[in-house]
Image: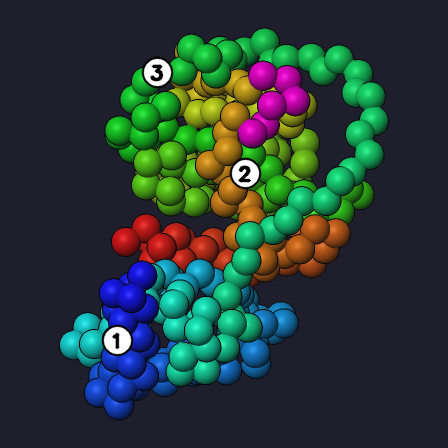
Amino acid sequence: MAKHLISYKSKRTRLNSKTIQNKWKDFVRFWNDEVNYFRKNQFSKDFTKRDIKVSTKAIVNKFKKHYPNSPCPTTSTVYKCLKSNEFSLSIDILQFLSVGKYRKRTLKTQKSSLKNAIPIHQRPEEANNRTTEGHYELDTVIGKREDKYCLVTLLDRKSRRLYSVRSLKTSLAVKEALIKIIENNALKIKTSTIDNGSENVLLHEVINQNNLYKCDAYCSYQKGSIENIHRHIRRYIAKGISMNKFSDEQIQIMINRINEYLLLISK
């Protein structure tokens, strides 16, 4: 017990030493600059300036990218500093895990399953294990229920690269949106996983139905990768905000920034 206390005291002393404070001064300055920029631009309507809450790992990796020759604490060390309030780092910019709230569940009627797609349980192992690129998940993001437009999103399961375009909510429009994404980005789709939404009934005309896999009814969590990515979109376009007010250019700026962030936290 005594050795543990001595070790703890030694680490605390080292962390508070002027040497360490001087060593990490560039990182502390960078952190404070990021916090100030976030506070100023978190509600900006211009997506090129809009700043969102990020993870500690993202800030650390961003600092390493911009200042490769400057000493940088590890993500674990930054967490310890935040917990002990060393360097007085603000947590305003940090994202936290959402806490689900209880919702009253209503009885659902039986939902029909897509006919021109294969059950997800038959999806090939290379798609399940993310061993190669080219295996995608597709979904749509709705703003308001009465909106004219939605976002069609496509995610590579291995690279986690996100593609998206604004589209009308009809099945024909979603089909055309998928064609646009594929052609604009020269994608080769080996498989795609979708849910049983009526907007997906024509996708077999774009992707061979032998390569099109569907989730079980009411089990959209089975394509959890893209469901998780939608959380990043919601940081720019919250639920209940109309998609009609955003231009194609704004959507592309948002997608580019999300991909930059996903690349940061993947390192």
Q: Is residue 18 above or below residue 84?
A: below
* Residue identified by numbered label 2: 227
* Residue 178 relative to residue 263: left or right: right
Q: Which badge, 1 or 2, is on the more N-terminal residue? A: 1
The magenta segment:
216-221
Magenta stretch, main secondary structure class: loop
Indicate the secondary structure of the residue bearing disc 3.
Answer: loop
Q: Position of residue 28 (x, y in %)?
A: 36, 82
Judge by depth and name the residue closer to the eye, 95 or 42. Answer: 95
Q: Residue at x 49, y 38 (%)?
A: 226
Q: Given contact means CB atoms under 8 Å apart, are the residues at marks 3 and 2 in contact?
A: no
Q: Nearer the viewer, mark 1 or mark 2?
A: 1
Q: Is residue 106 above or below residue 51?
A: above
Q: Work out whether residue 18 can be spotted.
A: yes
Marking on residue 10: 1
Q: Which badge, 1 or 3, is on the more N-terminal residue? A: 1
Colour approach in the figure:
rainbow
Q: Position of residue 215 (x, y in %)?
A: 55, 20
Q: Nearer the viewer, mark 1 or mark 3?
A: 1
* Residue identified by numbered label 3: 124
Question: Toward which corner of the image does residue 170 lie, by quadrant?
Answer: top right
User: How many numbered markers are drawn?
Assistant: 3
Q: Is residue 116 above or below residue 182?
A: above
Amino acid type, label 2: Glu
